[in-house]
Image (cartoon, rainbow, N blue to C red):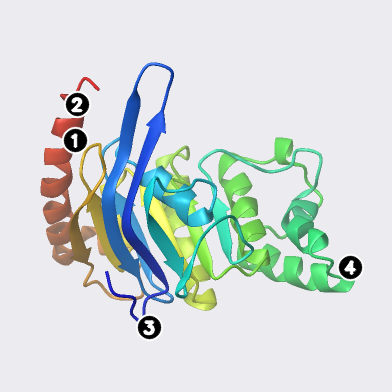
Amino acid sequence: MTEMAQDKVIIDGVSKIFTGKKRQVTALAEASFTVKPSEFVTILGPSGCGKSTILKIVAGLEAPSSGRVLLDGQEITGPGSDRGMVFQTYTLFPWLTVRENIEFGLDVAGKTKVERKAVSDHYIEKIGLKGFEGFFPRDLSGGMKQRVAIARALANDPEVLLMDEPFGALDAQTRTVMQELLLNVWDESHKTILFVTHDVDEAVFLGDTIYVMTARPGRIKAKIDVTLPDERTFDLKLTDEFMGIKKEVMGLIREEAWKAANTNT
């Protein structure tokens, strides 16, 4: 794959093999795709296809068995502050308050108290955490915890935000609210986002581009450009345009889900 100046992230022929005591499992097999600056990319595929593995490799938490990942033309060899990650599980520090969780990375980076407060104030307001600054994670709902996790990731001002099914554990109503909130934040921040999900509606609603993956070993099966308005609200999910894209994606993912369900490896 040729590096293009307009590509923020390049996943170039990435394979990943996990070795256990009794056998090897190929999670990814020569997966390749690109992400442009400020693009919101959703990655969709059946369970076990390597979606989360791709994010971990981009984050520098896993090394590819072969292939490479480039960020702004430079190969990723480990974690870095230019990438932030939000997981499905709530990864907040339980002994820190909402504000302290958001400011944690800034504190580690040596920012002053005034600088930290300015940044945390901004995201507390933007993410809808006003009034909860002194709360501990144990006192928050699942949706509120994920708001803090997103604010913490954004506070460090990463160039790329990696999101691994961050709303997967939320109820349907909270999930819808969080999707709209994330789009509002993205519209303001212009971050490049890679978002993994199992949910077809979520993939279509959030994404500029959808990459559909095959059953394990994961490859890119299809790229779908989402031709929906930039301003998206819940009502968009009821339109013919949305349903048409959803139908296309459902056809692709259903075939791979059947393959995954009938594989005994």
User: Dot 4 lies on which element?
Assistant: helix
Other-residue count near label 3 (Cα within 10 Å), few / some / many at <14 / 14–19 / ≥20: few
Tell me, for residue 257, which label it has, or none: 1
Tell me which label, 1 or 3, sits earlier in the chain.
Answer: 3
User: Dot 1 lies on which element?
Assistant: helix
User: Dot 3 lies on which element?
Assistant: loop
Q: Which residue is mark 3?
A: 5
Quadrant showing the C terminus: top left
Front position in the image: 110 or 182: 110
Query: Which of the 4 image quarters holds residue 95?
Result: top right
Q: Amino acid at mark 3?
A: Ala
Q: Which residue is mark 4?
A: 113
Question: Residue sitting at 54 percent across and 75 percent down?
Answer: 189
Circle 2 or circle 3, nearest the eye: 3
Task: Where is residue 8? Give x, y as percent.
Answer: 42, 74
Tell me which label, 4 or 1, sits earlier in the chain.
Answer: 4
Tell me which label, 4 or 3, sits earlier in the chain.
Answer: 3
Q: Is residue 144 visible?
A: yes
Q: Amino acid at mark 4?
A: Lys
